[in-house]
Amino acid sequence: MAAQFGRRLRKGATTTAVAAVAVAALSASGAPGATLATGSDDQQSAGTTPSPDDSAATGNSPYYTDLPPLNTPNKPGTSTNLPVTGSAESGIPASILAAYKKAEQTVADSDAACRLPWQLLAAIGKVESGQARGGRVDANGTTFSPILGPVLDGRGFAMIKDTDNGAYDGDSTHDRAVGPMQFIPSTWATWGQDGNGDGRKDPNNIYDAALAAGRYLCAGSRDLSMATDLDRAVLSYNHSDAYLRTVRSWFDYYKRGTHEIPDGTGAVPPGLGGGTDPSPNPGTPGASPTPPPSPKPPRPGGGTPTSPKPTPPTPPPSQTVARVENAGTGTLTATAGDAFAERIKVRAENKLGDSLAKASVTFTIAGDTDATFAGGKNAVTLLTGADGTVTAPVLQAGEKTGQFTVRAVPTGRSLPAVTYTATVTARQADAIARTDEKALTAAPGAEFADTVEVKATYKDAVAAGVAVTATMITDAAEPVENDKGPYFKDADGKTVRTLTDLETDADGILKLPKIYADGTAGTYKLRLTTEGGATVVIELEVEAPQAPAA
């Protein structure tokens, strides 16, 4: 979108300068090579601060000046499977963190040269919406209520007339920034993405918004591993030195480490707790020192906050879900491709400690896995029965082995989740044997004419997709790989005597690649071992052809 305004208004400029000094002190050791300009908020470019692009993701709507905690996080932010520890302020809600990392991977697959770090998305998400109001999203990553910036009607801020007929922001007269990454509708029309594969581009969905932000930050030929390009990308989101410093401080903090916390338990900037108004935030208790509470520096694109919605009546304690707990779920283990025999079962309790019927519980699969619930879904929402319990659908293991997590949480409530660890093991075989009994012979320096074919089974049934290792071994009491005799060839035509990454087909059959003989005659052994420990040893004979009888 073309820039809608040329300079920032100076309302609150004094407090902005104080905030800028505080943030600059915290982020002085930002990314290597980063050089940030100083000056007032309405400064377009100074020092070495790069000029912005001719578009803005957010319309420069209000943002939050929360600063990171002074202490370095205890846990490295490298996995969505990290323990739930530490303060909510320094953590990132599980679905929000997963969306940032998914966006990083998606962009890397199509634009590797950009080198988009998920920590940059996390920094912008923190500054724009407090990580989607502390992770208040449903199982699909959509905020429970829209996150809307103030009306861009020119009253103290820039004027942006309606561009979406109110489709995203509910305002058919003026635009408002929308969603956890605060896109204005006209920019979303260009950059909107479907990050969760549901066929929709929804700015209020964190997966969609995070991917759109990633694409936007990577516009052109930017390489975000370079400080100048990263600064330019952030300034294209909001051309303000104070904004750049604030984002940079969170970016540096998240790079040093963070941890995952349950959805809905993150710190919420003041003004974001229950409505759609992301009003300015003077600081968060427990964070590093910030200026005294005062009006946030205005950002073009802001306006008068909407009035809060009436608070609905509070249900009695007997009808209010207070917690969910494990209701006797056993160990969750399955072989790749199989269904888990055990099913997850939870119980909902009210504030009086009694079982609660008709309570909505959402089950969500998280982690690096292709496992799903029956029907191919990775999230389902169900109601508890008369006894207060509910059982999740059958878990179906995919082909990825290892561990993943399933969470059960009261739907739409900021309550702790019950977390289960599920394990997918590799397909196994308890027997493997040749499919024929042909003698395998070859002349020195020639190739074996017959192909080695074996079949794997498990409990007398076909064992499909089982990993097999083939090794030419010595004839010793404790065999090791042979350094002479028959061999295979790798993709480059080089001699190898061990093959990995072999796998049986749907019928449990494995046909080995061609086998070659070197110049040494003799009897040799080929050993095939399956995942699960089944083994077969096959003899290979290398002998010179017999001379024809006289």
Image (spheres, rainbow, N blue to C red):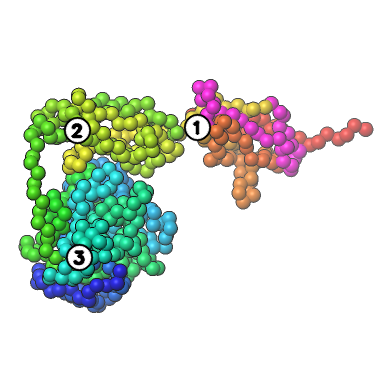
Residue type beneath disc 3:
His
Which residue bears the numbered disc 3? 174
Residue 8 lies in the magenta stretch: no
- Vertical order, 99 against 316 (above or below): below
The residue segment tinted magenta is 437-464
| Quarter-of-image position of residue 287 | bottom left
Q: Quadrant of the N terminus?
A: bottom left
Crowd band around label 2 with a 10 angstrom C-alpha radius: few (<14), some (14–19), many (20+) = many
Name the disc covering residue 531, or none: 1
Q: Residue, x 64% and y 49% (percent of image)?
A: 493
Q: Determine the CA span between mark 2 and mark 1.
A: 43 Å
Instruction: Please tell me whether mark 1 sits on a helix, a strand or a loop.
Output: loop
**Mark sitting earlier along the chain (2/1):** 2
Q: Where does the image place residue 108, in percent across and percent down from the top left?
A: 40, 57
Majority secondary structure of the magenta segment? loop
Which residue bears the numbered disc 2? 359
Residue found farthest to the right: 550
Q: Residue, x 16% and y 63% (percent of image)?
A: 151
Instruction: Please tell me whether mark 2 sits on a helix, a strand or a loop.
Output: loop
- Vertical order, 539 against 498 (above or below): above
